[in-house]
Image (spheres, rainbow, N blue to C red):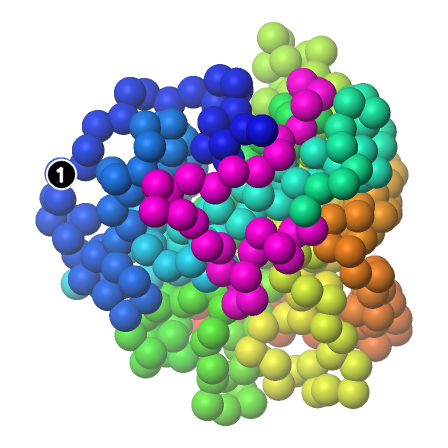
Amino acid sequence: MYNLVFERGLETAPSSTALAWSPMITKFHDAMRLYGGRLNHEHLEESGITLIEAYRTRAERLIASARRDHPRLPAIHFDYVNNNSLNAYAFKWGGDYFIGITWGAFTILRLLFMRMLADKNALLTIGDPNREGNNLLPLDKMITIGPSVQLPSTGRLVVGAPQDPTRLQFAVTAFETAFSFLIRHEITHILHGHLSHPLVASTEALLPEFGWQPKTASASSTRQVLEYDADRYASIGLAKSFMSHISTAQNNSIDHRAFMTETFVGIGSMFRLFGDASASGLDLGTLPYPPVRYRQYISMTGFCDYLNMAANKTLFELSQAVFTESFAAIENAFPNFTKVEPSIEGLNEVLSANGRRHIQWLFDEWQNRVKGELLPYSFAKFLS
């Protein structure tokens, strides 16, 4: 058994030190008081602090990269929220910009990929599944309804990690992809001016990933388009990073299929965790968020679409094949650790004529209306 916060040194970070409560940290805490405030994680075990700080560094590097690409983007402070729910926030407070990821989101997603790859009946093409167990606790026994996660007083959550080194590395990389996607998603809310859109600015310039309730149908449709933009741009960002990474001489030997599989499983599993509720019979345009299966599909296909736009036919065709394989692998994996029969009702809806019309509607609304509404507030020269 391995601690969730300690995994054979696969991840590295600078030696952790207790963070001083700088003015920005204090401001973050004050802004997040209603949601739990800033996570004071210095009480966790050293390995937990090291892991959290490693991903803080990852988030800060993504923010710094966005600022290099878009010099007008203001400074953004990243931190963790002391909240066990699965959520993330982009917000503006006192003239400054912030991104917050809940402790629950970090822990639950971490647990998800460890549990997936520790099961010998899941993701059978990764490493040697026979080195894993087949009688592990279901995920819902580890995560309480909400969803939230219960930690003992030590701040340690113990879970069976994959025993096969290749599967363990895959679990770590898939989590890294999911985490990076979340950060890129929140950066997009700021970069594209979402927080300054009149709809959002009237609600204290805060966008939670879950729980935002609009007052009108028009507000609902606009909010849905904002999420569509953030999901799609985050996946495009991952594809751009992939193309940049493989273009360097020392990375010419990268296994493109393996890289794409980690990416698609990371993004797809994260959204698959959110649920499979079908929107069938509802007016899709009046929902505050795109249905989860739509977000899963949009986010995974955004990666492929960028390769197509980059006119790399070989990689585009490979990405389509890996997308299909990964989607099937995720669907086959989830019943093994949820102990619930798979439901593809929501997925069937996405692939239906009605679903394709709704995805086209989201794109059209973005291109023809919301994009123009955001141009006065955007820090990007061009909104893709």
Dot 1 amino acid type: Ala
Taking 11 as reference, is 312 left or right? right
Assign a secondary structure to mark 1: loop
Residue 76, can we see it?
Answer: no
**Mark 1: few, some, or many residues within 10 Å (few <14, many ≥20)?**
few
Q: Looking at the picture, how far across and down is residue 139, in whole percent?
A: 65, 52
Judge whether 309 appears above or below 254 on screen. Answer: below
Q: Which residue ends up furthest to the top in the rendered image? A: 250
Q: What is the span of residues highlighted in magenta in the rendered image?
A: 138-166
Taking 327 as reference, is 172 left or right? left
What residue is rendered at 58% in x and 73% in y? 289
Taking 290 as reference, is 203 left or right? left
Decide whether residue 229 is among the magenta residues.
no
Residue 274, can we see it?
Answer: yes
What residue is rendered at 24% in x and 38% in y? 42
Which residue is nearer to you in this view: 153 or 50? Answer: 153
Quadrant position of the N terminus in the picture: top right
Q: Looking at the picture, how far across and down is residue 263, in whole percent?
A: 67, 37
Taking 258 as reference, is 314 left or right? right
Which residue is nearer to you in this view: 127 or 308? Answer: 127
Decide whether residue 152 is among the magenta residues.
yes
How many numbered marks appear?
1
Q: Looking at the picture, how far across and down is residue 310, in whole percent?
A: 70, 37
Judge whether 283 appears above or below 237 on screen. Answer: below
What residue is rendered at 40% in x and 54% in y? 102
Which residue is nearer to you in this view: 216 or 37? Answer: 37
Residue designated by label 1: 20
Q: Quadrant of residue 201?
A: bottom left
Q: Looking at the picture, how far across and down is residue 6, in whole percent?
A: 47, 27
What residue is rendered at 29% in x and 50% in y? 39
Which residue is nearer to you in this view: 134 or 333? Answer: 134
Judge whether 33 appears above or below 22 on screen. Answer: below
